[in-house]
Amino acid sequence: MPRSGSHMTHLSPSRIPSHVAIIMDGNGRWASARGLPRAMGHRKGVEALREAVRAASECGISYLTLFAFSSENWSRPEGEISDLMGLLRTFIRRDLAVLHRENVRIRVIGDRTTLASDILPLLLEAEETTQDNSGITLVIAFNYGARDEIVRAMRRLAGEVAAGRIDPEDITAGRIEAALDTAGIPDPDLIIRTSGEERLSNFLLWQAAYAELMFIPDFWPDFSRETFRAALARYAGRERRFGGLQPATTLAVGS
Ligand code: IPE
Ligand code: IPE
Ligand code: MG
């Protein structure tokens, strides 16, 4: 999605994260501050999401993971849950063709087994339609919780051991990674959370081992490409050491 690239000049390519993950938080408070129903905040949040995908793609990010609905969000009022499910449906129906045209590859992480029966085919369609695209990978975390993901992965590995296909000693960090929903996706370099809250709320707990964390005060609906670019500029100034003594900008854990 090339647009004006001129405002990119101050970011050195070697300091651009390969994977950015965002906890899109603050839709409800954005709406309340304006005397609007929370649903309006979620609706505006989808616009910010579109902008984030575009900004990430322009900046040369390879993977963008967006936390859209957590496994704990089921504890919200029924009406809000159905608003959020409705927004996912509309987003995929309206935006899939555009994202596909823009060469975006879509992956979905989270537990698919408890979703409404019409949502699963939409998610599968999004993944299948875009699987051969070579642009940015948009990872949508939907009905996602890191502990739930780890439990499902452990069950899978335990099943392999019980069936005699692997020994307990064969369980390595690599095998655990391959059993997670994020199999094949590199760990996030940068995790951004909007709305001023400073917690992970069960997001990518395994994968976040060496991620840079960034908490920004803006509510998610106010997130813009400028906010994104400012976050990348701050990230470029971070020194990553991965437990060693030398600063490293691109090394992944274990590599
Ligand atoms: C983030 O905004 C969207 C989801 C969690 C689905 P919130 O709905 O959490 O908004 P706040 O945090 O209540 O303001
Ligand atoms: C995290 O936000 C989940 C998403 C952004 C989808 P929450 O609003 O659910 O997190 P808590 O409850 O404030 O920790
Ligand atoms: Mg919230």
Image (tube, rainbow, N blue to C red):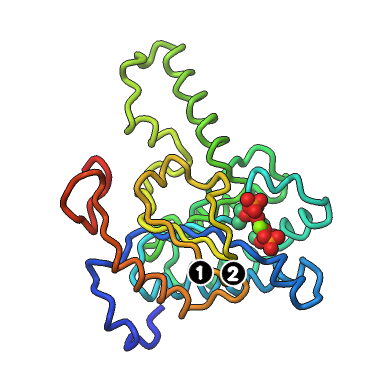
**Location of mark 2 (residue):** 95
Binning the other alpha carbons within 10 Å of mark 2 as few (below 14), some (14 to 19) or many (20 upward) gives some
Who's the residue at 33% across and 70% down the image?
Answer: 60
Residue 122 visible somewhere in the drawing: no
- Left or right relative to 62: residue 28: right
Q: Residue furthest left?
A: 246
**Location of mark 1 (residue):** 99
Q: How many marks?
A: 2
Where does the image place residue 31, in percent across and percent down from the top left?
74, 72
Binning the other alpha carbons within 10 Å of mark 1 as few (below 14), some (14 to 19) or many (20 upward) gives many
Whether the residues at callouts 2 and 1 have beta carbons within 8 Å, the answer is: yes
Is residue 9 positioned above or below 15 on the image?
Answer: below
- In front: 196, or 211? 196
- Left or right relative to 191: residue 44: right
The quadrant where ligand 1 appears is: bottom right
Where does the image place residue 65, in percent across and percent down from the top left?
48, 57
**Is label 1 within 8 A of ligand 2 (CB to nearest ligand atom)?**
no
**Tag 1 secondary structure:** helix
Q: Quadrant of the C terminus?
A: top left
- In front: 209, or 4? 209
Where does the image place residue 133, in percent across and percent down from the top left?
40, 62
- Left or right relative to 101: residue 145: right
Q: Amino acid at mark 2?
A: Asp
Who's the residue at 47% across and 18% down the image?
Answer: 158
**Tag 2 secondary structure:** helix
Is residue 197 positioned above or below 254 on the image?
Answer: below
Who's the residue at 26% across and 55% down the image?
Answer: 240
